[in-house]
Image (cartoon, rainbow, N blue to C red):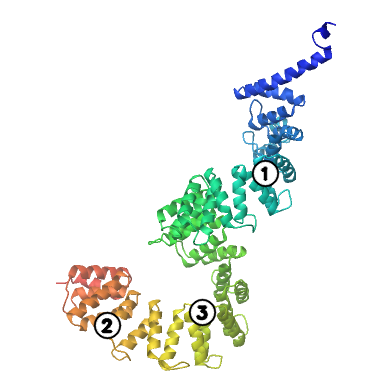
Amino acid sequence: MGWKARGGSLLERLKSLVGKSEKLSLERARRAFSEERYAAAAADFKLLAESGDPEAQWLLGQCYEQGAGVLRHPVYAVRHYRLAAEAGIVQAQARLGEILLTGLGAEGVATDSAVQTIESATTRPSVFQKLFPDGVSVAPKLDEAARWNTMAAESGEAGAQARLGHHFASGTGLERDLDRAAHWFKAAAEQGHVAGELGFGLLHVGFYGEYGSVSEAIPWLERAARQKDSTAKLVLALALLELPDAKRDPARAAKLLGEAARAGQVYAMYRLGEMYRTGTDTPVDLQNAETWLRRASAKGNVRALVSLVRLYAELPEPDLQAAVVSCREAAELGDPEAQYLMGVFVLEGHGAPKAPTEAFAWFQKSADQGVVGAYERLGAMYAEGLGVSQDYQAAAKWFHAAAEAGDHDALMHVGVMHMNGFGFEADPAVALKHYQDAAERGNANGCLQLGILYATGERVIQSYATAAHWYRKAWELGLPEGAYNLAELHLQGLGVSQNENAAIELLENAADQRLMPALWKLIELHGDNGIRPDAARTHLYLGQAAKLGDASAADALFRRYLDLPEDDAARTLESLEAAAAANNPAAMYCVARTYIGEGARNLDKTRAMEWLTRAADAGHTQAAEHLERLNREPLS
């Protein structure tokens, strides 16, 4: 009776007290957690979880995930999250969807590799096995992750909506559906969730496949970037570089790349370095290029190492040794382009000793990864027996592989082999077919070789008109030899009209591309006995040839110097000195001779000895002999 008088039966009273006790414990546990009394909080959460309180399960899962008041244990965290999620706790569903999408490692407990090492060291149960009988990490489970993310997303949880968008966009855990991906990314983005904004932007820039357009991505990427998301800044920068010209914003893109790079985005470091190296959309800045490419390569970006190779090789004063160091590192990491470049370095002895056998090995590695240039190199090395035993059949195999992959020069090599009977019975018809194929595919060398064959009548019916056609094609494709040979036909009126003006124009074009035979032809045509005598032009072309290193041109300028009046001789000396400054040893020796006093003018002992020494050091034999004589009998 007494119990009833106080308000109900004993059982009802106990139920009431239990209810108050649970409420009090949850509040107390929350308060303890906020006050960083984690052990007390975890103990209360555990008590309540054992009695079936879903919210306590959620909170206890957080304790196990964070190691707050209990030993950190990802597996136990997921176990409690799952109980809470099944009871309808949206936060638990969302967190479970996130963990099972990416997995949850055991940082702070031990890494899987560390545990495996310990386990393999003994057959006895380890301390880790006793402490963590269920393991220490959670592997991704994509189907289950998609289920929990769907439940949380449909309840309006923004992070889960963004993840669900990723499930649909990438086809992980769910069938790929870009329209549904767009729906969920946008739902998260409209709640201001950065992953939704980024995901919606990535969808429109084509990261997941063709969908929408880059211009549609920009506003969403801008929103994510304003939330200081470094990935969004990187993607936005790339998008701004890919827009049509009227909408591109290279300056803003460079700024965003800088911000993303400073935030640790490795690809941003690489792209920024490349922009500075190549001068693409920003002024060339080799110092900044090296800084960012070095940082990217230190973070494991192999392409940055390859870019460093190009940077060092293209400096005004190339540092080929530094280029080789970076190239070897990238090649050993398996980059196919670096392997190809490493082959070139050691084949040609640039920045490293010549080593044909090593070069062959690098080309082989590069070819195995599909680098077409390596096919052609391997073919050439087999054909020459360089770095490997000569094998024409193997050479033909690699040349054919290169040709099939679009290397038109390789077609020419196969043609040469058939023309000369290297590894095959000589067959001019087959060779001609390969030349023709290469030429029709736009190969300038193929055009040139066809022109030569038809001009000479070698193994084909001679036809100057056909030769002129192919020479013209070679020139149009940028080969100066085509212009030179076509000029010869115009001078003689073979297959084309005899036209001195057209010939000279073609020769001048070829000379502008530093073709030495064209320069000498112009010198001949404008010389005293030429069809267009012109002393000024003769002097001009001799100067150009000498500056390109031609010894005969330097000697011809010196003879003119000896015979010309003083004013004209001074101009000739300027041309000789320009050629000497361009490292032509013959020009250095000729300049020295002018200062020795040959021609009865311009005696300057100091400058004479300086230029003689430079010429001798550059390997000019006569200069060395002359210097030796002067050392025995100094100039008076």
Mark identifier at residue 352: none
Instruction: Give the mark nearest the N terminus, 3 or 1.
Output: 1
Image position, residue 421 (x, y; %): 59, 83
> Relative to 301, is 79 on the left or the right?
right
Of badges 3 and 2, nearer the viewer stands: 2
Q: How many marks?
A: 3
Q: CA distance from mark 3 to mark 2?
A: 34 Å
- In the image, what residue type sits under mark 3? Asn
Q: Nearer the viewer, residue 508 or 234?
A: 234
Q: Are marks 3 and 2 in contact (CB under 8 Å)?
A: no
Identified at 48% across, 64% down, the residue is: 345
Q: Element under label 2? A: helix
Residue 590, relative to residue 90: is it above or below? below
Image position, residue 329 (x, y; %): 52, 55
Image position, residue 167 (x, y; %): 69, 48
Q: Nearer the viewer, residue 392 or 190?
A: 190
- In the image, what residue type sits under mark 2? Ala
Instruction: Give the mark nearest the N terminus, 2 or 1.
Output: 1
Q: Element under label 3? A: helix
Residue designated by label 1: 161
Residue designated by label 3: 445
> Relative to 367, is 547 on the left or the right?
left
Specify the quadrant that holds the N terminus. top right
Residue 129, relative to residue 38: is it above or below? below
Image position, residue 201 (x, y; %): 59, 51
Q: Nearer the viewer, residue 509 or 170?
A: 170
Mark identifier at residue 536: 2
